[in-house]
Amino acid sequence: MLFSWHLLYNDSVKVVSIVGMTGAGKSEVSKVFEQNGFTSIRFGDLTDEEMKRRGLKPKEVSERLVREQLRREHGAAAYAELNQPRIEQALKNSNVVIDGLYSWEEYTCLKSCYGEGLYLVAVWSSPRTRYARLAGRSSRRLTPEEAASRDESEIENIAKGGPIAMADFTIVNESSLEDLRKEAARIVSKLR
């Protein structure tokens, strides 16, 4: 269900969506926006909530099952549409940063709602760098094989590359966390 968000939109409202492959650093960039007054909404919370509801353990295979099932049931823009009430509520008080827009359809859904008020920030890291990070995570850990499989699925099945290609800003995250945070803060300053 799409809301008439364009009625709420004005020139000062900003919805910033962080896009990138798994392990690129999207959540870290989102934290910088949140520290600068944006309300953070993580699209993946829907997957986590549904997995908890079903009593499933957080593993790549069960997470993929839930993601694909939600998209089959609600359409390719499911995560954008199902999160719209949260975005709408947050926009009453602040700008919004979305952690993890995935599909081309989610992008076009949000673009139709926010027009020029939607900004995409792509976070890019090489597969080698991302896979090493993912294998070392304390939560939502992925083996290199699981990460490669997820990359393939997200590129082929949900057109994740499209939103990355349409980014207004791109951060190359191949060095330190401090450098990533500085780049994110630079983008926040440009959007003020």
Image (spheres, rainbow, N blue to C red):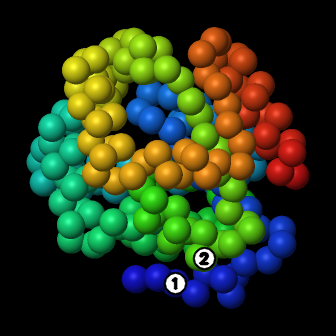
Tally of numbered tags: 2
Quarter of the rendering containing residue 155 = top left
At label 2, the amino acid type is: Cys
Of marks 2 and 1, which one's residue comes earlier in the chain? 1
SS at mark 1 in the image? loop
Give how far apart the Cα atoms at labels 2 and 1 are. 8 Å
- Dots 2, 1 in contact, CB < 8 A: yes
| Residue 189: image location, x then y, percent | 86, 42
Q: Residue 173 has which mark?
A: none
**Screen quadrant of the N terminus:** bottom left
User: Which one is nearer the viewer's eye here, 177 or 160?
Assistant: 160
Q: Is residue 30 visible?
A: no
* Comparing labels 2 and 1, the label whose residue is closer to the camera: 2
Residue at horizontal 46%, vertical 45%? 161
Q: Nearer the viewer, residue 179 or 167?
A: 167
Q: Residue at x 33, y 15 (%)?
A: 135
Residue 178 in the image: above or below residue 170: above
Decide if residue 102 is in sight here. Answer: yes
Decide which of 180, 155 is in the foreground and name it: 155
User: In terms of secondary structure, where does tag 2 sit?
Assistant: helix
Residue drawn at 50 percent across, 28 percent down: 24
Q: Judge left or right: residue 6 versus residue 159.
A: right
Q: Which residue is mark 2?
A: 113
Residue 95 vertical placement versus 52 (above, below): below
Name the quadrant containing residue 177: top right
Mark 1 highlights which residue? Answer: 3
